[in-house]
Image: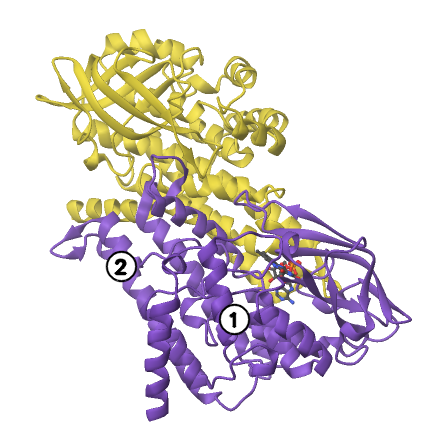
C-alpha cells in the first residue's frame, strides 16, 4: 500500500513535468502508423511514454512494457486522467494483437513485434472479415499455401479498419480446406507494404473512409510469423476477439478513456439536456426527456459497477473469456443509446453536418451519432454476442 | 368517415408510384443530394403537369383539384417510399396549407393557382419548427417591415415566394415577400439530410405584405395538416426500409443459411412489420379525420409521433440487419436513414407530439 502511494507520487510528478500541453484534453492520439504524421507534442508524448514502458504498462520490460501490476496501472491511468492526458498510443497492436502474442507468440515473435508495437513503430489492422464471412467468420475463404519459409496468400478481406495506414496485418487464413471449417484456419502476420497487398477504401455512411477492402494476391507471410500451430488459428483468432470486445465493452485498463470509433465529442447527456431542452426550476424542462436522461445515467452507472465487479473477480484470470460478450453487448448498446439520446435532446440542432450555423458540439454530436451505429456491428454484431451468451455462458442448446 | 381507400384513390396511388419508380431512383436521389438546387426541374414539371401533385388538395376555385388530405397523403407516402427530392413538401404542402388555412380570400385567389400547378415555388417560413406555441418569437413585423431570423426553412434557396408567420403588435400575422427582395438573405445549411435542403433565412427591415391574421386555431390546423402529410411520407419510407430489409435477410447467407432464417432476426422483422402497420393505420386515420372534419383532435400528433418513431426504428434495424454493408455510402439504406432523422425532428419531435396529444386529451376531459 505504501509502495503504491510512493508510486502514485512519483507518477504524478513525472506526468506533471513531462506530459506536453498538446497531449492533454481532446485531440489526436498516436496510432503507431509510419504513414501518418502527427503533431510534435503527440509524437514527443508517445516517445517519452514508450521510453518508460508506459505505452503498454503491463507488458514485461523485455517486450517494451514496464511490468506494472494491475494496481499500479490503475494508478497510472488515474493520474493521467487527473491531468487530462490523452493515451500516448492506441492501436490494434496495443489493444488486441499484443495481448494475444503475449499468450501465444513465440519468443522471436514477441521480441520483434511487441517491442515495435510498444514504441509506436507500427500500426496494425485486422484481416478477419471477408465478403462471404462476417458473422460466420469461420467460413472464411482466403487461402494460404506453405511454400518453403513462406505462406503465399490469396483472397479478399473486407471492412479492414485502418488498412490504408497500417504497416502490418494480423490475418485469419484457410490452410486446410478439407477439414471442418474451424479446424483448417491459421493465424498469420504479414507486412502491408508488399506487391501482393492492395487496399481500396470504402466510403462510410458518414462520408469518411476509415476502412477498406484488402486484396491479397500472392501476398507473402513469413513462416516464422505463423502464430500458434498450423490449422489451430481459430482459437487464437477468437481469443483476440475477446480482447477486442473487452476493450469495446469498456473492460480492461483503458476503459475509462475508450470511446467508440468515430465518436468525436464526449458530451454529457444531462448537460446537453439542460442546455437544449431548457431549464425550469433547475430541472430539464421536459419531464419525459428528463426521465430518459436519468434512465441512461442509471444504466451507465450500473454497467460501470458491473465492470468493476467483473474486474475484481477476474484479477487472477489472465485473459478475458466468453463473458466478454456480455460487456460488448451492453457496452455497445449503451454507447449507441447515448449518442441517440444526445441528438434527440438537441432536436433540430442535432441534424447539423457542416458550416458555421451549427456549433462544434452539434456537428460532433451528429457525426458521432452516425458513427455509433457501427459499434453494434464491428467486433461481432450484437446478435452474435447474444448467441454466444446463450450458448457459451448459459449453456442453451443449439 | 372513410375507413379504407377507394378504388380511385388506389388508382391514383398507382399512377404516382409508377411515375416515381421511374424518376426517383436511388441514383437520381444521389444526384439531387449532390446538386445545389436539390431537385430536377423537369421531373418536377412533369409531376405537376402529368400527375398534378402540386394542386392535389387545393380547391378548384383556387386552381387545384379539390381533393383532401387523404389524396395528398397518398402522394406523400409514395414520395417517402421513393425518397423524392423536390419542392412538393415545402411548396404544395407547407406553404399552400398555410395560405389555405390562414390567408384572406383575395390572396388565395392571387397566389394559390400558380402554386397549384407548380409554377410558383413557395415555402413557409416559421421561426420555430418545433411546435406551434413556439412560433413568433424571432420574426417581428412593425409597419410592414420584417426583421429576424428563421433558423431552418425548407427549400428557401430555390423558392420564389416566402409565406411567413411573424409577430406584429396586433398579434401573429401571415405575410408574403418575394425571394430576392431587399433585406432578405438565405444561407443554405449543410445538414445531415441532403435529400431535403434547408436554409437559414434572415430578414432585415424587409418590406412584407400582410395577407392574414393568425390565431392559435388556424396555426394549429395548419400544423396538423402539415404533420399528417409528413407522417405519410415517413410511413412510406418506413415501408420501403422494411421491404428492402426483409429482402436482404432472404438473400444474405451466413452459416450456410439465409440470415432471415435465424429466429432472432425473424422476430425483429415481425416486430418491425407490426410497428409499421400500426403507424400506417394511425396516419391514414389522421388524414381521414382531417377530411371528414371529425374524430380525435390529437390524431395528427399521434400520427406524427408514431410515424417518426417507426421510421427511425426501421432505419436503425435496416442498418443493423445488414451488418457492415449497411454502414457504407454505397448502400442506399443510408439515404433513407438520413431522411428518417431529419423528418423525426421536423415540425416537432415525437416527444413534443406526445405532449401535445396528452395536453389535448386533458383539456377535453
Ligand atoms: C465500422 C466497422 C469497422 C470494422 N472493422 C473491421 C476490421 O478492422 N477488421 C475486420 O476483419 N472486420 C471489421 N469489421 C467487420 C465486422 O466485424 C462485420 O461487419 C461483422 O462481423 C458482421 O459481419 P457482416 O457485415 O458480414 O454481417 P452479416 O454477418 O452478414 O450479418 C448481417 C446481420 O445478420 C445477423 N446475423 C448473422 N448471423 C446471425 C445469427 N446466427 N443469428 C442472429 N443474427 C445473425 C447479424 O447480427 C447482422 O445483423 C468492421 C465493421 C464495421 C461496421
Nearer to me, B141 or B184:
B184
User: x, y percentage for residue A297?
Assistant: 31, 66
Letter of the chain that mark 1 sits on in the rendering: A
Give the letter of the yellow chain.
B
- Quarter of the picture containing the N terminus of chain B is top left
Pointer 2 residue:
A270
Nearer to me, A247 or B211:
A247
Residue A299 in sight in this render:
no
Residue drawn where x is 44% and y is 80% of the image = A73
* Residue located farthest toward the right when viewing the structure as drawn: A148
Nearer to me, A231 or A351:
A231
Mark 2 Cα shell of 10 Å, populated few (<14), some (14-19), many (≥20): some
Q: Secondary structure at mark 2?
A: helix
Mark 1 Cα shell of 10 Å, populated few (<14), some (14-19), many (≥20): many
Q: Secondary structure at mark 1?
A: helix
Mark seen at residue A50? 1
From the viewer's perspective, tell me whether residue A307 is left or right of residue B365. right
Q: Quadrant of ligand 1?
A: bottom right
Real-space CA distance between mark 1 and mark 2, rounded to the nearest whole angstrom: 37 Å
Position of residue A289 relative to residue A72, above or below, is: above
User: x, y percentage for residue A295?
Assistant: 31, 65
Give the letter of the purple chain.
A
Does the beta carbon at disc 2 come under 8 Å from ligand 1?
A: no
Nearer to me, A54 or B191:
A54
Letter of the chain that mark 2 sits on in the rendering: A
* Residue located farthest toward the left when viewing the structure as drawn: B169
User: x, y percentage for residue A356?
Assistant: 35, 35
Amino acid at each position: 500500500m505504501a509502495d503504491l502511494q510512493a508510486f502514485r507520487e512519483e507518477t504524478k510528478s513525472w506526468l506533471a513535468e513531462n506530459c506536453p500541453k498538446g497531449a492533454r484534453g481532446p485531440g489526436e492520439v498516436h496510432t503507431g502508423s509510419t504513414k501518418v504524421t502527427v503533431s510534435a507534442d503527440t509524437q514527443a508524448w508517445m516517445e517519452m511514454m514508450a521510453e518508460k514502458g508506459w505505452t503498454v504498462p503491463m507488458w514485461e520490460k523485455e517486450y517494451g512494457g514496464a511490468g506494472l501490476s494491475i494496481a499500479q496501472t490503475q494508478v497510472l491511468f488515474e493520474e493521467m486522467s487527473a491531468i487530462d492526458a490523452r493515451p500516448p498510443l492506441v492501436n490494434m497492436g496495443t489493444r488486441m494483437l499484443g495481448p494475444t502474442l503475449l499468450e501465444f507468440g513465440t519468443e522471436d515473435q514477441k521480441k520483434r513485434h511487441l517491442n515495435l508495437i510498444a514504441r509506436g513503430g507500427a500500426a496494425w489492422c485486422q484481416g478477419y472479415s471477408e465478403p462471404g464471412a462476417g458473422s460466420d467468420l469461420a467460413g472464411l475463404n482466403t487461402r494460404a499455401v506453405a511454400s518453403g519459409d513462406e505462406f503465399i496468400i490469396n483472397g479478399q478481406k473486407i471492412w479492414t479498419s485502418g488498412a490504408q495506414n497500417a504497416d502490418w496485418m494480423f490475418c485469419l487464413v484457410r490452410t486446410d480446406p478439407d477439414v471442418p471449417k474451424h479446424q483448417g484456419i491459421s493465424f498469420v502476420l504479414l507486412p502491408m507494404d508488399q506487391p501482393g497487398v492492395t487496399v481500396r477504401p470504402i466510403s462510410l455512411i458518414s462520408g469518411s473512409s476509415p476502412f477498406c477492402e484488402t486484396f491479397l494476391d500472392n501476398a507473402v507471410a513469413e513462416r516464422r510469423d505463423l502464430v500458434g500451430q498450423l490449422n489451430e488459428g481459430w482459437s487464437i483468432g477468437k481469443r483476440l476477439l475477446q480482447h477486442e470486445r473487452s476493450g469495446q465493452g469498456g473492460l480492461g485498463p483503458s476503459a475509462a478513456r475508450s470511446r467508440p470509433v468515430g465518436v468525436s465529442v464526449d458530451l454529457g447527456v444531462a448537460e446537453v439536456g439542460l442546455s437544449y431542452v431548457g431549464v425550469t426550476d433547475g430541472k430539464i424542462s421536459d419531464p419525459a426527456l428528463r426521465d430518459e436522461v436519468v434512465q441512461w445515467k442509471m444504466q451507465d452507472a450500473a454497467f460501470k459497477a458491473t465492470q468493476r465487479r467483473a474486474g475484481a473477480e477476474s484479477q487472477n484470470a489472465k485473459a478475458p473469456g466468453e463473458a466478454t460478450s456480455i460487456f460488448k453487448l451492453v457496452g455497445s448498446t449503451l454507447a449507441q443509446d447515448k449518442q441517440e439520446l444526445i441528438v434527440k435532446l438537441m432536436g433540430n440542432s442535432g441534424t447539423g453536418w457542416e458550416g458555421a450555423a451549427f456549433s462544434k458540439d452539434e456537428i460532433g454530436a451528429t457525426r458521432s451519432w452516425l458513427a455509433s451505429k457501427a459499434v453494434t456491428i464491428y467486433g461481432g454484431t450484437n446478435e452474435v454476442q447474444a448467441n454466444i451468451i446463450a450458448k457459451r455462458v448459459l449453456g442453451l442448446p443449439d | 368517415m372513410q375507413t379504407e381507400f377507394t378504388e380511385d384513390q388506389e388508382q391514383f396511388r398507382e399512377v404516382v408510384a409508377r411515375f416515381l419508380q421511374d424518376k426517383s431512383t436511388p441514383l437520381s436521389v444521389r444526384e439531387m443530394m449532390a446538386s445545389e438546387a436539390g431537385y430536377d426541374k423537369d421531373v418536377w414539371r412533369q409531376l405537376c403537369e402529368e400527375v398534378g401533385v402540386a394542386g392535389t388538395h387545393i380547391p378548384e376555385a383556387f386552381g387545384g383539384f379539390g381533393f383532401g388530405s387523404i389524396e395528398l397523403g397518398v402522394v406523400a407516402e409514395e414520395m417517402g417510399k421513393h425518397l423524392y427530392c423536390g419542392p412538393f413538401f415545402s411548396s404544395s404542402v407547407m406553404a399552400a396549407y398555410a395560405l389555405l388555412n390562414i390567408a384572406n380570400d383575395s390572396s388565395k385567389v392571387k397566389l394559390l393557382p400558380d402554386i397549384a400547378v407548380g409554377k410558383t415555388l413557395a415555402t413557409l417560413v416559421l421561426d420555430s419548427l418545433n411546435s406551434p406555441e413556439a412560433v413568433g418569437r424571432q420574426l417581428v413585423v412593425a409597419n410592414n417591415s420584417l426583421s429576424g431570423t428563421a433558423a431552418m426553412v425548407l427549400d428557401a434557396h430555390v423558392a420564389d415566394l416566402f409565406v411567413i408567420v411573424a409577430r406584429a403588435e396586433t398579434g401573429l400575422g401571415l405575410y408574403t415577400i418575394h425571394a430576392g427582395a431587399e433585406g432578405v438573405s438565405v444561407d443554405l445549411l449543410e445538414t445531415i439530410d441532403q435529400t431535403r435542403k434547408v436554409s437559414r433565412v434572415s430578414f432585415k427591415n424587409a418590406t412584407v405584405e400582410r395577407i392574414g391574421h393568425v390565431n392559435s386555431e388556424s396555426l394549429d390546423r395548419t400544423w396538423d395538416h402539415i404533420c399528417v402529410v409528413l407522417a405519410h411520407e415517413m410511413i412510406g419510407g418506413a415501408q420501403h426500409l422494411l421491404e428492402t430489409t426483409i429482402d436482404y435477410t432472404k438473400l444474405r447467407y451466413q452459416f450456410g443459411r439465409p440470415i432471415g432464417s435465424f429466429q432472432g432476426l425473424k422476430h425483429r422483422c415481425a416486430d418491425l412489420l407490426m410497428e409499421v402497420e400500426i403507424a400506417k393505420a394511425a396516419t391514414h386515420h389522421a388524414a381521414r379525420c382531417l377530411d371528414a372534419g371529425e374524430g380525435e383532435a390529437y390524431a395528427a400528433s399521434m400520427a406524427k409521433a408514431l410515424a417518426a418513431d417507426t421510421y427511425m426504428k426501421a432505419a436503425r434495424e435496416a442498418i443493423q440487419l445488414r451488418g457492415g454493408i449497411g454502414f457504407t455510402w454505397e448502400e442506399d439504406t443510408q439515404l433513407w436513414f438520413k431522411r428518417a432523422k431529419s423528418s423525426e425532428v421536423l415540425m416537432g419531435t415525437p416527444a413534443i407530439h406526445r405532449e401535445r396529444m396528452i395536453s389535448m386529451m386533458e383539456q377535453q376531459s
